Image (cartoon, helix red, strand yellow):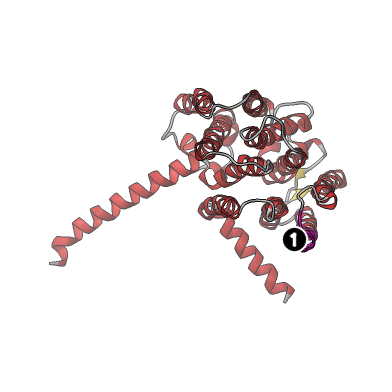
Amino acid sequence: MQSSTYPDERVEKKWLTAIWQRIYSVCLFIRFSALGGTFLLPLLGAGSVPSAMPMNKWLGLLSIALVFHLFAYILNDVIDLPLDRTEPRRADFPLIKGTLTPRFALAAALAQLPLAVGIVRWMQSNWLAYAALAIAFGGMAVYNLWGKRARFPLLTDFAQGISWASLALFGAASKADEPTSLTMYLCAYLVLLICLANGVHGSLRDLANDFQCGVRSMAIYLGAKPTADGGLHIPQGLRRYAFAFQYLLLIITLVPLIRNDFGYSPTEWLITLAVIVLMGGLSLRLLDIAAGSAPHRQTLISAGMLQLLVSLGLLIMLFAFYLPAWLLGLIIALFFLPLLTHRWLYNMLRWIRQRWATWL
């Protein structure tokens, strides 16, 4: 009896494995694990404006975030395909494996442009929303085309930062014709954070392959290079660059809180200040660990990714008492759930457990 059912079980297992592989490939292709960060920006942008908004516009914000996300990541994969083929971490990606063609991927990326226009028209958006979205798509195209080829990489990192910040501005513009001061602080924070993330953490993560392929990332521009023993040489100039951006991020966080542009009660203000100070100190410590982990790539990546998560979490906590409870819950859920599908999250958790054991 077992021998008669065994072939059926084997076929079923093979079928389920094939389905899982396709789902996994789709998730890699659309960068599902990073989708939460994209959703976060227009929602926080809308939350920075204290007025009501109909449900169709909230759905429109999420739709715009999705199409922008697909445009940004798929176009990047198409343009960087020759470089990605030399990077072992990309081996499972559909374009690298050949399960999807570059022509199909490019068509999928460009198809998001008319979709975005259609969604904005359906939302009956104002001129500022159109302008913000045009800047977002345009800035991302500039980065994807010249981000690893520009003579001065900070300019293209800045273009990418403006692009993501414009997505937050679009969220605010969906509520009002003029953004608030909180919107401007939010956008400034995002520009600096993207410059730090791409110019330091992302550049160091990909340093060995980028250096071999002649890429001009910000880390390489400032003198970082791989070493013969598989580690990295991280010069003081790059460390100073990273900490300058991190201190600016903390200043931008504290200024609207000190001014109390949120209108917090004394209790809300003190709780927010305490959390911001603790998370700000943690982000500085994690940045110091990452910058001091040149011989240990996994430590550098884990500390760097955790530092970025803390920096985004700090932004959420800054707005926590300002946002309606339902919007705060939606932001937290949409931000964290996609992260659960990324393998580096579990590598990071193992790293945290190891560090915690040594601290104890």
Q: Residue at x 66, y 28 (%)?
A: 132
Q: Position of residue 137 (x, y in %)?
A: 62, 27
Q: Nearer the viewer, residue 55 or 341?
A: 55
Secondary structure of residue under mark 1: helix
Q: Which quadrant of the structure image shows residue 77?
A: top right
**From the viewer's perspective, is residue 126 above or below residue 181?**
above
Q: Position of residue 27 (x, y in %)?
A: 47, 44
Main SS category, magenta section = helix
Q: Which residue, as the protein is rendered here, is positioned at the far bottom?
A: 360
Q: Residue at x 82, y 44 (%)?
A: 245
**From the viewer's perspective, is residue 270 above or below residue 82?**
below
Looking at the rendered image, the quarter that the N terminus falls into is: bottom left
Q: Nearer the viewer, residue 178 or 25?
A: 178
**From the viewer's perspective, is residue 28 above or below residue 110?**
below
Q: Position of residue 174 (x, y in %)?
A: 61, 33
Q: Specify whether residue 301 is in view.
A: no
Which residue is labeled 1 in the image? 268
Q: Nearer the viewer, residue 217 or 107?
A: 107
Say which amino acid is labelled 1: Glu
Looking at the rendered image, the quarter that the C terminus falls into is: bottom right
Q: Is residue 272 magenta?
A: yes
Q: Which residues are magenta?
A: 264-278
Q: Is residue 343 magenta?
A: no
Mark 1 is surrounded, within 10 Å at the Cα level, by few (under 14), some (14 to 19) or many (20 or more) other residues, namely some
Q: Specify whether residue 132 is in view.
A: yes
